[in-house]
Structures are given as C-alpha cells and as structure tokens.
Image (cartoon, rainbow, N blue to C red):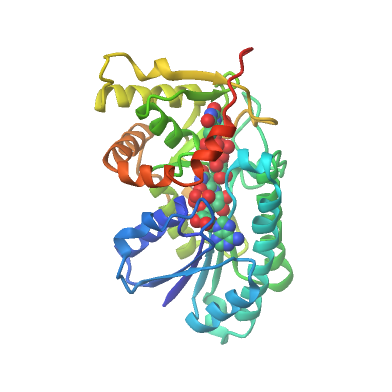
Amino acid sequence: MTLLITGAAGFIGANFVLDWLAQSDETVVNLDKLTYAGNLESLASLQGDARHIFVQGDIGDGALVARLLAEYRPRAVLNFAAESHVDRSIHSPEDFIQTNVVGTFRLLEAVRAYWGALPEADKAAFRFLHVSTDEVYGSLGKNDPAFTETHRYEPNSPYSASKAASDHLVRAYHHTYGLPVLTTNCSNNYGPYHFPEKLIPLMIVNALAGKALPVYGDGMQVRDWLYVKDHCSAIRRVLQAGQPGEVYNVGGWNEKPNIEIVNTVCALLDELRPRADGTRYSAQISYVKDRPGHDRRYAIDASKIERELGWKPAETFASGIRKTVQWYLANPDWVAHVQSGAYRDWIQTQYVRDEAA
Ligand code: NAD
Ligand code: DAU
C-alpha cells in the first residue's frame, strides 16, 4: 500500500512523513516542488530508505500527477503542498493563487480520473485528504466563541483566500463527483523543521544571533498553538476513521497573544542558553510596523474531532515549546543551511522598524 503525499519537504509534511514511517512500513511518495520552503534536509534521516520516494514536481502538473498515480497506485492522496506564509502572500499573491487554487484544482482533476477508474472496492476505500487552515474562517473578536466546522468562511489575506478557494474545490469534488475527500482545518503549528520566517522559529534564531525580535503592532494578536506532531497524529486519525465529505477542525485549546509567545521563547533561552553578557533575550524585542489586514484572533473548537474520532493532543504548550527550543539548539546546522539561502535576502526586506509603535 502507498500514500501520495504532496508538499512533504515542508514543515508539516516532513514531520508527517517522519512520524508515519516511524510507525508504518507503508511507502510514501513525496511530490514536492521544492520552493524556498521545501527542504529535503529535514528528511535526511530517510536517505536510502526505500519506503520514501521523493519526486520533485508541481501539484499543478496534471500529467506528472497522473503518471505518479498510475505508477504507484496510492490508496490515498494527502495534500500538504501550498504557499503557506501570510506575509509573502501580501507581497506576492500570484504564487498563492497558482499553487493553492490552480494547483489544488489540477491535483483534484488528476485524482478524480484515477479514482474513477479504480475497482469498486478500492474506489470506496480511497481518500483525498486536504490539509487546510483555521485562517479561512477569518478573525474573531475577543469574546467570540472558537471556530467550529460550520463557521462561515471569511478569509482576510491572499493566503487565507487561496486556501478557502481550495477548500471549496475539495468540497465540490465530493458533492459533484463523489470523490471521498476529508478536510482538516488546523490552527498554528510549531515544532522541529519550521522555516524561520514564521513567528516561533524566527524568534529563536534571531535571539540566538543577537538580532531584533520583530513583534508586529502591539503584539496582542492571538493565535491558537498546536505542536506539529499533534497535528500529524490528527491527520493520521482522520485518514483512518474520518467520514468522507466531512471537515475536522484541529487545535490544542492553546490561545496565546504573540507577545506572550515571544516572552516564553526568551525565558526558555535564558534558561537553556543564557546570554554571555548575563542580560535577558527579551531585551531584543522590537515592536515593528503591523502586518496589513492582520487578523486579531484565531481559536479552534476541536470538539468534533475529539468526540467523533477520539483524537486529543499529546503535548501541552509548555512541553511542546520546550521541545521546540531544545530542537533548534540541538540543530544549528539545519538552521545555518536554511539561512545561507535566499531566505537571508527576504528577511532583510521584511522587517521595517516602526518608530511610531
Ligand atoms: P511549508 O511552506 O513549510 O511547506 C510547503 C511545502 O509545499 C514545501 O515543501 C513546498 O516546496 C511545497 N510546495 C509549494 N508549492 C508546491 C507545488 N506547486 N507543488 C508541489 N509542492 C509545492 O508549509 P507548512 O507549514 O508545512 O504547511 C503545510 C500545509 O498545512 C499547507 O497546506 C498549509 O496551508 C497548512 N497549514 C499550515 C499551518 C502552519 O501553522 N504551518 C497550520 C494549518 C494548516
Ligand atoms: O493559523 C494557521 C496558520 O498559521 C497557517 O495556515 C499558516 O500557514 C501559518 O503560516 C500560520 O500563519 P500566521 O500568520 O498566524 O503565522 P506567523 O508565524 O506568520 O505569525 C504568527 C503571528 O505572529 C501573527 O499574528 C503575526 C505575528 N508575527 C509574525 C512574524 C513572522 C510577528 O509579530 N512577528 C513576526 O516576525
């Protein structure tokens, strides 16, 4: 048996493949375009492992996807591939439309053709699992209840709008063609192999490098944090027992304002890698210009996946963030190799100190 997993050289996909192959001998075909976010070094431990087959390519290349489906006959396709960074979507939305909307559409078309020709038993057992985000639901007010699966879609950034469009396509392929789809909408992930353009890894690597820790606006925006391995276990559970056509929100009931996250990272570094001059890492915090259209608060109501599929996260925020900081301290080469790429140019243009803040 085989899974076709897209975008598995990225942060969550790589963690998923590592966890999957630690518990199963089912082969994984990893289709990844290797954009700036794709990093095969994250999968270095699988070198020479015949259970991991890497193919560099685009989910929007229908002929390639059709060939892979015909060759490997997967029992499921898991779609992690996406442009995922909100700030990049504000600067350059085109790539987000191409991959997240057009790419998902082409992937669905190739999968529909493959699935339609499967023998009946295989057809019934087949799954297309689409990995999506809580950002499609928009922004919550301070006292609003957390997002349920029936919350209306109100995406606010080019990123979340493109993910929302992909979710609608996935839904339509179930409703119209009967494709057995599953969609997960997860909150903010953190953990090993996270590209250091996102809040938590950026704070860790900047702190260690003695650089400013850029906090957007007033730092009181709220995100709901989930350790990446818990997201992976939720996806495994949904693949195993989710009902076709259903949507599952995934989250860890861990709402925190950004400034609290940054202070927590600083305190852990103070403990685990104290600064040579004895001062605190929090002295590096720098309030910068806010992200345009910045969503104020996300929160996931994960009751459905808990109730219907019996899934719960294993980590608390305290245990997960400690593991994460420890991982970055133990893997300076991974960080250095990421930083020696085009990422450095990006970071220089991104953070503008807001003197008024
Ligand atoms: P990431 O940016 O780290 O990785 C994305 C991967 O997709 C990269 O390896 C990249 O090379 C690949 N890719 C991009 N365009 C492609 C294309 N056209 N064809 C094939 N591969 C392509 O992203 P991530 O944080 O690992 O997120 C994975 C998925 O989970 C995304 O769909 C994202 O929307 C969703 N998600 C992320 C989070 C989070 O906090 N990171 C939370 C909820 C949902
Ligand atoms: O909610 C799920 C989403 O979480 C995923 O769908 C996205 O793919 C993922 O990138 C993430 O989006 P966010 O925009 O929430 O993540 P990011 O790490 O970019 O930012 C987290 C919060 O921290 C957000 O409120 C913006 C703020 N921030 C971010 C950066 C990079 C800062 O204050 N300073 C920063 O330098």
Residue at 65 percent across and 51 percent down: it is 163
Left or right: 296, with 324 as reference point = right
Image quadrant assignment for residue 216: top right
Count of marks placed on residues: 0
Residue 193: give x, y in percent of width and height: 39, 47
- Front residue of this view, candidates 205 and 194: 205
Is residue 259 visible in this depiction of the protein?
yes
Image quadrant assignment for residue 324: top left
Left or right: 115, with 31 as reference point = right
* Depicted 336 relative to depicted 97: above or below: above
* Depicted 126 relative to depicted 316: above or below: below
* Depicted 333 relative to depicted 348: above or below: below
- Front residue of this view, candidates 310 and 31: 31
Is residue 300 visible in this depiction of the protein?
no
Residue 174: give x, y in percent of width and height: 67, 67
Residue 244: give x, y in percent of width and height: 59, 65
Quarter holding the C terminus is top right
Left or right: 317, with 118 as reference point = left
Residue at 61 percent across and 32 percent down: it is 145
- Front residue of this view, candidates 8 and 232: 8
* Depicted 242 relative to depicted 69: above or below: above
Residue at 68 percent across and 72 percent down: it is 109
Residue 326: give x, y in percent of width and height: 29, 37
Residue at 62 percent across and 47 percent down: it is 149
Quarter holding the N terminus is bottom left
